[in-house]
């Protein structure tokens, strides 16, 4: 089922400071590159963006996107990815009317992704190749806390 979207932007952007994670610079491989040793190896830029946005939203931290690099076409996003962005906005605004104009909602998603990528980068720098294990442990802890809260 296809949904109508109103005033979607043409592209999603990331800050210039994150270009090495998204696209790579010189001999530094982009995280999604097929020969990268990152947990994002073989993924698309849009996948990295959505993951970073989710981390930023979970931590409730946003930051300004400086030196916008609009490199992720919104048309490449799946309907589920678009609704992940829009549901984040709905949770923040608590008003369905915010969906009348989606462009500012995508800009907010960019701010969450900007901060989320900073968080991910700091964790990768700290945990290195053990980062997936750290994520798994953190997720288990969240699920256990959620189960305890519902009991």
Image (spheres, rainbow, N blue to C red):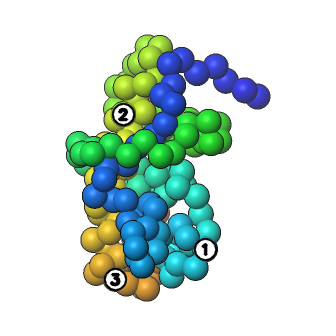
Residue positioned 40% across, 73% down in the render: 26
Gap in Å between the C-alphas at discs 1 and 3? Answer: 21 Å
Instruction: Check disc 3 and report the residue beneath it.
Output: 127
Residue farthest right in this picture: 1
Quarter holding residue 82: top right
* Callout in the foreground (1, 2): 1
Q: Badge 2: how crowded within 10 Å, few (<14), some, or many (20+)?
A: some
Instruction: Check disc 2 and report the residue beneath it.
Output: 107
Q: Secondary structure at mark 1?
A: loop
Query: Image check: 25 left or right of 99?
Result: left
* Mark 1 or 2, nearer chain start: 1
Gap in Å between the C-alphas at discs 1 and 2? Answer: 29 Å
Q: Secondary structure at mark 3?
A: helix
Q: Are marks 1 and 3 in contact (CB under 8 Å)?
A: no
Please name whichever residue, 150 or 116, is drawn nearer the observer in this view of the structure.
116
Q: Which mark is residue 34?
A: 1
* Mark 1 or 3, nearer chain start: 1
In this picture, is 140 found above or below 1? below
Classify the position of the N terminus by image quarter. Answer: top right
Q: Position of residue 50 (x, y in %)?
A: 49, 50
Residue positioned 39% across, 69% down in the render: 25
Residue positioned 34% across, 82% down in the render: 127
């Amino acid at each position: 089922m296809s949904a109508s979207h109103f005033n979607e932007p043409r592209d999603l952007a990331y800050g210039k400071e994150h270009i090495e994670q998204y696209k790579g610079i010189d001999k530094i491989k982009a995280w999604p590159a097929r020969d990268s040793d990152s947990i994002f190896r073989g993924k698309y830029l849009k996948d990295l963006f959505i993951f970073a946005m989710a981390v930023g939203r979970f931590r409730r931290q946003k930051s300004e996107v400086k030196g916008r690099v609009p490199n992720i076409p919104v048309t490449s996003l799946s309907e589920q990815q678009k609704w992940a962005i829009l549901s984040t906005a709905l949770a923040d605004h608590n008003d369905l009317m915010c969906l009348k104009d989606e462009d500012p909602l995508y800009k907010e998603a960019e701010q969450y992704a900007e901060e989320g990528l900073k968080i991910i980068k700091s964790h990768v720098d700290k945990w290195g190749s053990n980062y997936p294990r750290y994520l798994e442990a953190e997720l288990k802890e969240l699920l256990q806390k959620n189960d305890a809260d519902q009991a």
